[in-house]
Amino acid sequence: MSDTVLVLDFGAQYNQLIARRVREAQVFCEVVPGDISYEEVRKKNPAAIILSGGPASVFEPGAPSMDPAILTMGIPTLGICYGMQLMAHLLNGTVTPAERREYGRTPMTLTQSSPLFLDIPEHSTVWMSHGDHVLKAPEGFTVLASTNTTPIAAMANPARNLYAVQYHPEVHHTEGGFRMLQNFLYQIAHLEPNWQPDQFIPQAIAQIREKVGNGRALIALSGGVDSALAAALAHEAIGSKLTAILIDHGLMRQGEIEEVVQAFPSLDLRVVRRDDVFFAALKGVTDPEAKRKIIGREFIRAFEHAKEAIGPVDVLIQGTVYPDVIESGGKNARTIKSHHNVGGLPDDVGFEIVEPLRWLFKDEVRKVGEALGLPDSIVWRQPFPGPGLAVRIVGEVTPDKVDILRQADAIVRQEIRKAGLERQIWQAFAVLLDIRSVGVMGDERTYGFPIVIRAVESLDGMTADWVRLPDDLLETMASRIIGEVPRVNRVVYDITSKPPGTIEWE
Ligand SMILES: Nc1ncnc2c1ncn2[C@@H]1O[C@H](COP(=O)(O)OP(=O)(O)OP(=O)(O)O)[C@@H](O)[C@H]1O
Ligand SMILES: O=c1[nH]c(=O)c2[nH+]cn([C@@H]3O[C@H](COP(=O)(O)O)[C@@H](O)[C@H]3O)c2[nH]1
Ligand SMILES: NC(=O)CC[C@H](N)C(=O)O
Ligand SMILES: [Mg+2]
């Protein structure tokens, strides 16, 4: 048996939160589509399975389901919300729309003792978010907990290793939620808390060696922490068989190309200048998803172009991390935006793509980076998206607009650095809108572009809150931007969290 937990994804908004909590409990965890086959599960041989929540109703035609045989394997399985309803539905219990929906804070009472609730008080407050409920538990199940409106808030069939809860243990607001997940992992699945992100270093190095064999590999290096770590691992794995490629797509920030070149003196690093190709491909394009797909395609074409100068190379290593994969849309989850390196990839790619960090969250990447001795300036660098300034220009991307945004962005970042806030903020940057407004400067009417300042705090980029920047700092930025950047006459501050917003504007 492996030490992995599989989360079957039925389209929950925050199913990555379940994965995070499991990893916080020091157990490795992978999110897979809910309709994964019995065979596939057998091959992965997980130590435990968690069924996620989801927006559908199990009794609706076409609702996401799973192979019921997976529930007969004896693998400890925990259903959460939709996952509980699905378990009940597939095992001939009854699921119906509830007379009263339950959203948010709900008092719950334990009615039967179970290792699942070890050290959890009889009365606690849990977080609910459901419109359906299990009216009758399947045969062989006992009810473990209830609330005022939900008679079956938790149920179990210990003989078959099946457990389920209607509430959301993965959210912080649920009292004892993390404890319950730990109980499931340690008491029921008998897992040991021994997974650490840096364990994965030797594994990643071996994977790269195996894939590259006697050939050569390219590493797509942006200078960001993800690709810097991937490059360090790849360099360790294959040494001089590695060439780093930095694409200058004309969408980088002020001085960035030079800075990256200086930061990696030990790599065979080549800058591939493709700004004319990217700008030509983006001409006239305004739809954000269309822009992202074009950029994804042009990245690959640029790596293929670079390969011609180097000779035969089969493998392209990228610093893709888990949120890039999750946000690009799963089977039941909605596509929020196609990240250039995942959902934005073209169908024809002239490489085998190797992504050693594909399973890590950003904070885990940072921990591994520290363990490998990467400098602080790289480990704690604020993320910068691969499509660069293009996803911060609403509407058509032109060299002219990039020039305006680049100057405004440099001012925002300089002022954040001066104020000593760079490290505690997840990202701070400028956005250029494609509207204009009227102003007055030096008694003269102006009709110029607005710049949006965006600063957010976050742990992993999956959720974020806007930063309460001091007024005088905002004022300094605004007056510098309007004074120094031609054609900008207004500055606004974005006070939207994620959700409902996203961090980038496109
Ligand atoms: N200009 C670029 N040249 C070459 N590769 C790039 C470039 N921009 C992005 N990539 C590739 O795409 C991957 C995803 O980009 P992403 O911005 O998510 O990661 P990063 O730049 O390594 O780290 P960070 O998220 O901290 O910016 C990178 O890891 C890298 O492999
Ligand atoms: O490499 C990347 N390629 C992309 O296409 C991309 N889109 C968004 N981002 C970064 O991901 C995090 C979440 O961004 P959003 O809230 O805008 O989805 C933030 O940190 C964004 O900067 C990207 N990174
Ligand atoms: N959060 C969930 O998983 C909701 C499950 C189901 N859609 C309900 O409303 O009951
Ligand atoms: Mg980046």
Image (cartoon, rainbow, N blue to C red):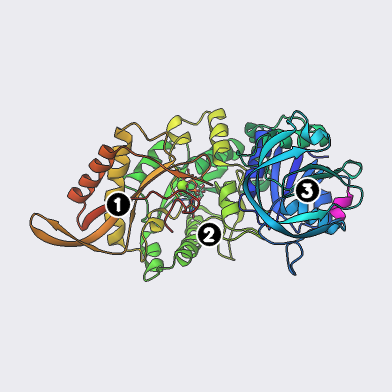
Q: Residue at x 77, y 51 (%)?
A: 84
Q: At which x and y percent is residue 115?
A: 82, 33
Helix, strand or loop at mark 3: loop
For the record, the magenta segment spans: 69-73
Q: Amino acid at mark 1?
A: Val
- Give me the disc on residue 338: 2
Q: Earlier in the sequence, mark 2 or mark 1?
A: 2
What is the C-alpha distance between the residues marked 2 and 1?
27 Å
Q: Amino acid at mark 3?
A: Pro
Give above or below for 222 relative to 193. below
- Give me the disc on residue 492: 1
Helix, strand or loop at mark 1: strand
Q: Earlier in the sequence, mark 3 or mark 2?
A: 3
- Pair 3/2: label in front: 3
Indicate if the residue with disc 2 has its beta carbon within 8 Å of ligand 2. yes
The residue wearing badge 3 is 151
Q: Residue at x 50, y 31 (%)?
A: 374
Q: Quadrant of residue 469?
A: top left
Give above or below for 223 relative to 346. above
What is the C-alpha distance between the residues marked 3 and 2?
41 Å
Q: Earlier in the sequence, mark 3 or mark 1?
A: 3
Q: Residue furthest left?
A: 443
Q: At which x and y percent is residue 7?
A: 72, 48
Give above or below for 392 relative to 110. below
Q: Report if residue 280 is visible in the image.
A: yes
